[in-house]
Structures are given as C-alpha cells and as structure tokens.
Amino acid sequence: MQASQQKADKPLSLEAPGDLLSGLLGVSAAGTLAVPAGSVRALTVEYGEWCVAAPLSGRLRLSWADRAWALEERQAAVIHGAEALSLLAAEACELGVLILRGTTADAVLECCRREGGLFFENGGLAVERMLRQLSARQPHEVPAKEASEHAYRLLMALYGSASAGPENGKKVPLVVEAALGILHREFAFLDSIAELAERLEVSQEYLTRSFCRYIGITPGKYLTQVRIENAKLLLRQGRHSVQFVSDACGFSNSNYFARVFRSSTGMNPRDYARREGSLPQPRQAQEDALYVL
C-alpha cells in the first residue's frame, strides 16, 4: 500500500471503493506502519484524503506544517491532505493508519476541526477496533461497502471528542517551524546544520536545543533520516542507480550513503532496491533491449 510510495508496512487487502463510495465515504488504505525507536518515517497524505493515525504500541511524535504532536497509545490524530507528515518514534512503535476520503469524511472531520481540533484522546481505541475488524476478513479482500460501514462507525466515535491537541495544541516555536520547512524542502542541498542556523539567524546551539526540545532529536539526525526516507522512495521506484539516489538525497558520496543506509535499515541500498522494487538495468543492457524484435 502506498501513499507517495508507502502508507503502511502491513497493508490490509481492501476492495477498491468505486466512484460512489469514494465520493461518499471510501477507505483508500488501512494497515500498520512500524517505526523503530529513534527513527524518522515519512508519510504523505494525498490531496482530498484524511489520514487517521494512532499508535497501537509505543509513543511517537508527529510533525507537519507548523505542528508537532506527541502521541501515545489510545490517542489518535487526523491529518488532511496534502500534507507531508514526519513520524519520530520515542520508542519502537506500531502505528495504525487509515486513509479515508469522501464527502462524509469531509463533513464530519471538518466539523471536528471547527469545534475543537483533530486530536482525539481516546481515538486510538476506535482505530484499533476498525483495523481488527478489517483484519478478520484476511486473507480475503474486504468488500468496499463493509469497509465504508466500519469507517462510518469510526467517524461517529471520533465526532464530538476532538480537542486542540496534546500539549494544549501549542505551535512549535517559529525557529523550529522554519527549520522543519527547510529540512523537508531542501534536504538535498543543505551542507550542514551550521548553514541552517545561519539562514535562520540563530546560533547552532540555540537551534539544536530548541529542536531537541520540541522534536525530540537533533536537527542533524533529523536531516539524515529525512534523506534516508527519500532515498527509500527513490530506490523503490527501481529507475535509479545507487549513485543517483546518493546525489539526489544530499549525501557526500555513495560509500558514505551506503554506510548510513545500512546503519538505518540493516540493508545496503542495492539489496533494499531488489527487495522493495527493482534495480534499473545497466545502460548497455537497456540499449541492447531496444534491438530485440
């Protein structure tokens, strides 16, 4: 299952909702996402979709736009597309993920947003229940109508229980908000955190201290893991060489990239590409293939 490449590590098999249910209340994807302790994972919510995320075990921090929320078991958050969402696990975490779309989801969740927010103190219980109900159908495909019925019950469980968010829904400081924006937009071009601090007109020590307080890790480690997550996306496409991926994601050279990638994933980039996608053919092999009739 993919949302910009990946929505969940253990996707459930869902029947495509079709035009009617997609327009009213469709479940585009459902499953779980493993986030190892201290690691950053990327999750993209497509335009017009709602991502309902809840830790089934462990704790993690969500950061997107100008928000950073710490989520624990039983809690849930809803993000509206198109948002680039980063997940940072304080400890090994399994995240339940549901992707909803349609006018019913729009109406209910927009009402939640107006009346309180899109954080739900006990919403994780409803997410876990829906995932368990969908899992009961496996290995068979879950009918779209049945998935939609479960989604409606989930929305009703969330409705009326929204709040501004953990930590009183406070925005992260402007300097951290700006740093997150630059790290996500320009991860391939930043030379160092010192450069980032200079652009933000603060000291590197102040930036690091503020970033750690609200995000949980140093900006340097965050930058590395954003690069690794984007490298995974490129490798899964199967169209790029390891050297290209290394350069495109801002690593100084492919050997260093391979070491960092292995440290983060336990696999070298080529093995990852073979397992998750397919490596591009060597240029000569591609050229030879053009002449096979």
Image (cartoon, rainbow, N blue to C red):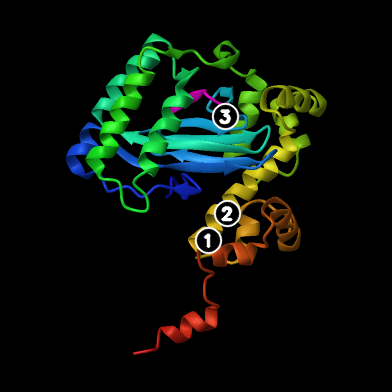
Residue segment shown in magenta: 73-79
Q: Left or right: 276 with respect to 138?
A: right
Q: Which residue is drawn at 30% across and 20% down?
A: 108
- Label 2 SS: helix
| Above or below, comparing residue 248 to residue 87 in the picture | below
Q: Can residue 145 be seen in this view?
A: yes
Can residue 80 be spotted in the picture?
no
- Dot placed on the residue nearer the N-terminal end, 2 or 3: 3
Say what amino acid the circle numbered 1 marks.
Answer: Glu
Disc sitting over residue 290 in the figure: none
Contact check, label 2 and label 1, Cβ < 8 Å: yes
Residue designated by label 1? 276
Real-space CA distance between mark 2 and mark 1, rounded to the nearest whole angstrom: 9 Å
Q: Marks 2 and 3, Cα distance to the nearest angstrom? A: 20 Å
What element does badge 1 sit on?
helix
Looking at marks 3 and 1 on the same chain, the residue that comes earlier in the sequence is marked by 3
Q: How crowded is mark 1: few (under 14 residues within 10 Å), some or many (20 or more)?
A: some
The residue located at (71%, 26%) in the rendering is 211
Residue sitting at x 68%, y 41%: 223
Identify residue for label 2.
Answer: 232
In the image, residue 230 lies at what x, y percent? 57, 49
